[in-house]
Amino acid sequence: MADLTTEFAGIKSPNPFWLASAPPTDKEYNVRRAFEAGWGGVVWKTLGEDGPPVVNVNGPRYGAIWGADRRLLGLNNIELITDRPLQVNLDEITRVKKDYPDRAVVVSLMVPVNEDAWKSILRRVEETGCDGVELNFGCPHGMSERGMGSAVGQVPEYVQQVTEWCKQHSDLPVIVKLTPNITDIKKPAQAAKDGGADAVSLINTINSITSVDLDLFAPEPTIDGKGAHGGYCGPAVKPIALNMVAEIARTPSLQGLPISGIGGVTTWKDAAEYLALGAGNVQVCTAAMTYGFKVVQEMISGLSQYLDEKGIDSVHDLVGRAVPNLSDWQHLNLNYITKAHIDQDACIKCGRCYAACEDTSHQAIAMSDDRTFTVKDEECVACNLCVNVCPVEDCITMVEMQPGEVDPRTGKVVEKDYANWTTHPNNPGACAAE
């Protein structure tokens, strides 16, 4: 059996699956249920300083994007940080950590950019016995308008300064949660590292409006006739998050900085992809809110089986395996050639591949009078669109060919060869050089 235990920024947990700072980690009751279900750790929903209470809306807090089958693809939320008293949260954290010493309990924090405010709350949080803190520099709504959340995360100088304060005034591991609402994720990540951060986590939610009520003419969720932008999460943000995680993992100056991957983790496969691209663990929110806490059991069993089948001994041995294969476009092998192939036995003759290719691509699929669809190799540029629009899995596949090889399906020679790509007129680098 593969070893699923992890040590992330010095914090140990029995598996790499943590619950992200969000409604599922808002209180002791939830967290206890999560740990009983099998989660390896939690990041407690963001705490703020004592003072005027945080007041959340009492109307709808979530907007949604669904797939055609009503599967939830993304959530937009306008909920703020915890609206429960600070001391109540601290007392609950203390009890939970005492009862679950083998699980990771990290506390998310958000206070103004003021050294005394951070020093004060860190002192109180340390007394709970928690394993670390996560600095919420990512929340894009509500709190950002008060000079916190993404208003800090978008300014690398603030990121570095607050991180330095936290490292100065606390011995706890410091994880910096980064906002995706920025042009270059590497800059705040570098600022966090320069400030002494023990790790970064990303992504926080994406600034968004999911829909508009066309009767009320207001963004949804709608509160008394008005709406506001919120934070977008769920399966739909996973491609964005994977790219940002990978950018940090492959940047030389950020080497060695642990990464906690967040964004659309719904299955063990999602988690494995994050790990392969450099994340040391993953955090989950929307999947738990959609399917309940026991969804982690499928994640644990699936990841364990995958590692066993691959002969990978531990989660640690999976981390970063895909990073060396992440390349810039200019370094891709242009002598690598594939052609689309349609499995006639699997084809349901829907014609979707033909319509997509004929209207929007390279007119590389032919349709006979009896609706048999075949690939015209001489026109196929291997764009893969037909594979992606086909409703039947593995009906259309891409078959690798070699330049000069005779395609056994057609008897034609594969002619395309960019062996001299460095001087080829279609190479933008070569043109620029000239």
Image: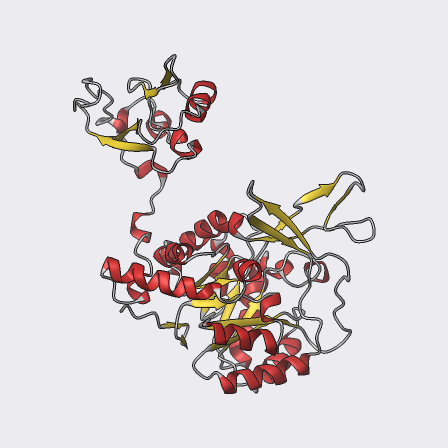
In the picture shown, does residue 295 fall above or below 416?
below
Q: Can the viewer see residue 178?
A: no
Location of residue 193 in the rendering, given as x and y in whole percent from the top left corner? 46, 65
Q: Residue at x 41, y 67 (%)?
A: 16
Query: In the rendered image, which quarter is residue 409 located in?
Result: top left
Q: Looking at the figure, which quarter contains the C terminus?
A: top left
| 313 vs 395: above or below | below
Q: Residue 311 occupies which quadrant of the picture?
A: bottom left
The answer to whether one can see residue 13 in this image is yes
Q: Which residue is rendered at x = 72% and y = 58% of the image?
A: 145
Q: Position of 38 compared to 209: left or right? A: left
User: With respect to residue 70, does 311 lie above or below?
Assistant: below
Question: Would residue 142 appear left or right of 389 to someone viewing this image?
Answer: right
Q: Tell me if 316 is positioned left or right of 41 in this view.
A: left
Task: Give residue 182's position: percent from left, percent from top.
Answer: 56, 50
Q: Is residue 411 left or right of residue 213?
A: left
